[in-house]
Image (cartoon, rainbow, N blue to C red):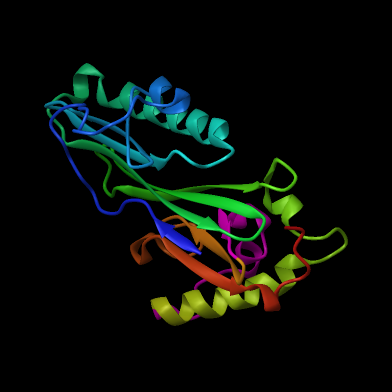
Amino acid sequence: MRVPVAAGVLAVAVLFTAPGAAAAPAGCGELGGTAQDGICRIAETTPGYTLDVRFPLDYPGEGAMVDYLAQTREGFLNVARTPETRGRPYELDVTAESFRSARTRSVVLTLFQNVGGAHPSTWYRSFTYDVDRGNPVTFDTLFAPGTAPMDAIFPIVQRELETTSGLGDAIATGDGMDPAHYQNFAVTDDAVIFYFGRGELLPSYAGATSVSVPRTALPPIQV
């Protein structure tokens, strides 16, 4: 099941508490955010930059997600607040989408950043949690031992990305078979959805992409 949290690039004037907003839970509060309707919102606008971050409050492995967002925000602000960048329209926008299966919860962050380069950056960071066992799920622990998941995943990803992009033979086998490119994923009862940032498997002009791989096409999954 896919549960959208937020979409689009939104700029706001001040960090605010909307009517009906609740006191921020610990992780949200650490980031200086406000909580409303199950979402944490961190927003800041200055003459030099805008920052807008939203993420769900019900993810059971919140600590890792909060740490990642804190590091990402710090890196962005270290650049955006330097004197030589004043007046430039720097931007960091983070939205999130939630997924669930019978045993797992997943959150996929979509991060858009413009820090004055030739092109803005868009990338993904995912978090998946096994609610039955009480621990995070990584690509290395997703599949049963002794299986070869890339042999099943890559042909499907290659076919889908080349079809949707119209770029034939665009993915080198070495890149497509490298598990390092498959670390960001969400788990549902029917599929594993893999996310690829801009320029990760396809040329950067193709943008950020994702491919849903049916569970029936994959080796046994441990969640």
Residue at the image position 75 percent from the left and 45 percent from the top:
133
**Which residue in the rendered view is the most extreme toward the top?**
83
Q: Is residue 15 left or right of residue 126?
A: left
Residue at the image position 51 percent from the left and 28 percent from the top:
67
Residue 16 percent location from the top left of the image: 20, 27
Dividing the picture into quadrants, the one containing residue 207 is bottom left
Dividing the picture into quadrants, the one containing residue 49 is top left
Q: Is residue 51 left or right of residue 156?
A: left
Residue 156 percent location from the top left of the image: 60, 77
Q: Is 179 within the magenta?
A: yes
Residue at the image position 16 percent from the left and 24 percent from the top:
86
Residue 175 percent location from the top left of the image: 61, 62
- 115 up-or-down from 28: above or below: below
- 69 up-or-down from 137: above or below: above
- Write down the region rendered in magenta: 166-188
Quadrant assignment for the C terminus: bottom right
Q: Is 102 within the magenta?
A: no
Residue at the image position 51 percent from the left and 36 percent from the top:
65
Residue 201 percent location from the top left of the image: 51, 62
Q: Is residue 117 left or right of residue 130?
A: left
- 40 up-or-down from 102: above or below: above
Between 209 and 134, the one lying in front of the other is 134
